[in-house]
């Protein structure tokens, strides 16, 4: 085989490989976490303040999975009152349609058990936001749901 034929075969295989990679990359689902990302970016200073405020007061786990695989949200009374409303999101980062949202109005002894029985096994981003004494609080954690 001559040099010219070998180089031609290499170039053709390279082009086919690159076209295959482009086709595969176009098949990937690349969704943003939030539909209104730009609006939330403008309001992100509240999130930063809420994270810093919670970190300064944090005295233990906020979200954990107990021995029975139940998912529990724990908030100390120092930064939560029963009249506060907490918005919790469990975001499945690779499948937006699998996201879950909870609104918590009542806590029992600073503990709230989240019903995760309908969620798929896998990695989620848990976000919780609330206001206490008119100050924003925010908590975010990557969690793994197992059954």
Image (cartoon, rainbow, N blue to C red):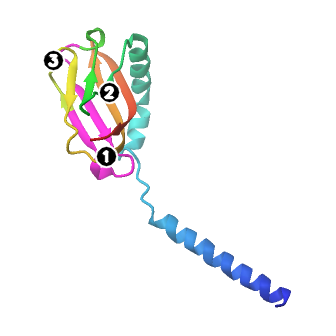
127 is within the stretch colored magenta: no
Give the Cα separation between the discs numbered 1 and 3: 27 Å
| Mark 1 lies on residue | 121
- The quadrant of the image that shows the N terminus is bottom right
Q: Residue furthest top?
A: 78
Give the Cα separation between the discs numbered 1 and 2: 15 Å
**Boundaries of the magenta span:** 81-102
Which dot marks residue 108? 3
Image quadrant of residue 8? bottom right
First-in-chain label (1 vs 2): 2
Tell me if 46 is positioned left or right of 85 in this view. Answer: right
Q: Residue furthest front?
A: 67
First-in-chain label (3 vs 2): 2
Residue shown at the point (28%, 13%) measured from the top left: 76
Label 1 crowd bin: few (<14), some (14–19), many (20+), radius 10 Å: few
- The quadrant of the image that shows the C terminus is top left
As helix, strand or loop, the secondary structure at mark 2 comes to strand
| Mark 2 lies on residue | 64
Residue shown at the point (28%, 45%) measured from the top left: 99
Label 3 crowd bin: few (<14), some (14–19), many (20+), radius 10 Å: few
Give the Cα separation between the discs numbered 3 and 2: 16 Å
Image quadrant of residue 28? bottom left
Tell me if 130 is positioned left or right of 143 in this view. Answer: left
Q: Nearer the viewer, mark 3 or mark 2?
A: 2
Q: Residue furthest right?
A: 3
Tell me if 140 is positioned left or right of 90 in this view. Answer: right
């Amino acid at each position: 085989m001559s040099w010219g034929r070998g180089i031609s075969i290499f170039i053709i295989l390279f082009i086919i490989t690159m076209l295959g990679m482009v086709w595969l990359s176009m098949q990937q689902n690349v969704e943003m976490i939030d539909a209104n990302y730009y609006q939330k970016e403008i309001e992100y200073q509240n999130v930063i303040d809420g994270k810093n405020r919670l970190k300064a007061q944090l005295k233990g786990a906020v979200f954990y999975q107990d021995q029975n695989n139940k998912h529990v949200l724990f908030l100390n009374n120092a930064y939560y009152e029963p009249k506060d409303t907490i918005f919790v999101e469990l975001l499945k980062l690779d499948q937006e349609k699998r996201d879950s949202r909870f609104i918590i109005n009542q806590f029992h002894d600073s503990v709230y058990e989240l019903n995760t029985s309908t969620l798929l096994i896998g990695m989620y981003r848990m976000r919780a936001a609330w206001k206490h004494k008119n100050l924003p609080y925010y908590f975010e954690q990557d969690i793994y749901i197992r059954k």
